[in-house]
């Protein structure tokens, strides 16, 4: 399966049309202001096209997300600091299966940017960008046999009820369209329900299905 990562640079450009200041509620001291628009915008080495290529080349699709067939779009915010380093990468939505952590890692590992300038001085600038995780082309199908044989365990949440993989197969069949999954998140079985105990699995994920 091929992995595609898309960066909509137009959204970045649109955010820089109007000069305004956003002040972080937790850091109101002078010099801690975060700008959302500046006179001279921060620049990734080589420009926006190079930034898109950096993301596409260095993004590592999480193994469990690839296994499940997760396709989705994350909106990520981050701050380009006065020294050009990227910090505070934060997902604004969730698709799960490790995609958020990978997007944070990728952004914060970014090469040093040329910082933004306001009133002749470098300032902190906040961006929001969409990053789309896509496996292959066309309709993706998740095979329960692949899930069973993997080092990961799965619990299925369908119409607000929890099921084991065997129970889910009676509802979904042996295969189902991957886009039926709304989000995949870690499952901890705090109530120690016996049928959801999977000590032989590396990690256990809760697959939450979209409601009809």
Image (tube, rainbow, N blue to C red):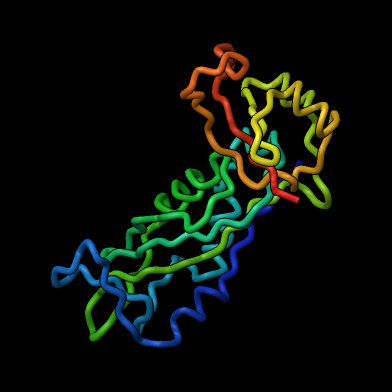
Left/right placement of residue 125 relative to residue 165 reads left
Q: Is residue 99 left or right of residue 67?
A: left
Which residue is drawn at the image coordinates 25% and 66% (left, top)? 25
Task: State the image quarter where residue 201 is shown.
Answer: top right
Q: Is residue 99 left or right of residue 79?
A: right
Q: Residue 171 vs residue 162: left or right? A: right
Above or below — where is 115 with respect to 19? above
For residue 113, above or below residue 60? below
Q: Quadrant of the N terminus?
A: top right
Q: Position of residue 53 (x, y in %)?
A: 58, 59
Determine which quarter of the picture holds residue 67: top right
Residue closest to the eye, 85 or 156: 156
Q: Residue at x 34, y 56 (%)?
A: 87
Quarter of the image for residue 80 reads bottom left
The image shows residue 119, relative to residue 24, as above or below, that is below
Q: Residue furthest left?
A: 30
Circle count: 0
Tell me which residue sits at (44%, 81%) in the image: 16
Q: Position of residue 192 (x, y in %)?
A: 50, 17
Of 86 and 194, nearer the camera is 194
Measured as percent of width and height from the top left, residue 135 is found at 72, 46
Residue 12 position, x and y percent, is 50, 74
Q: Residue at x 71, y 49 (%)?
A: 211
Is 71 above or below relative to 26? Answer: above
């Amino acid at each position: 399966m091929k992995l595609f990562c898309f960066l909509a640079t137009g959204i970045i450009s649109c955010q820089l049309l109007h000069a305004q200041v956003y002040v972080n509620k937790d850091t109101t001291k002078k010099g801690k202001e975060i700008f959302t628009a500046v006179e001279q915008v921060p620049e990734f080495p080589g420009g926006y096209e190079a930034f898109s290529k950096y993301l596409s080349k260095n993004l590592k699709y999480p193994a469990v997300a690839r296994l499940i067939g997760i396709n989705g779009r994350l909106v990520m915010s981050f701050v380009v600091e006065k020294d050009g380093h990227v910090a505070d990468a934060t997902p604004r939505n969730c698709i799960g299966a490790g995609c958020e952590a990978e997007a944070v890692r990728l952004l914060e590992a970014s090469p040093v940017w040329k910082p933004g300038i306001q009133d002749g001085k470098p300032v902190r600038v906040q961006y929001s960008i969409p990053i789309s995780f896509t496996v292959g082309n066309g309709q993706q199908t998740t095979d329960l046999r692949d899930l069973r044989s993997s080092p990961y365990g799965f619990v299925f949440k369908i119409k607000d009820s929890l099921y084991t993989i065997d129970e889910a197969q009676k509802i979904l069949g042996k295969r189902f369209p991957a886009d039926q999954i709304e989000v995949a998140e870690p499952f901890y079985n705090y109530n120690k329900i016996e049928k959801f105990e999977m000590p032989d699995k590396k990690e256990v994920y809760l697959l939450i299905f979209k409601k009809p």
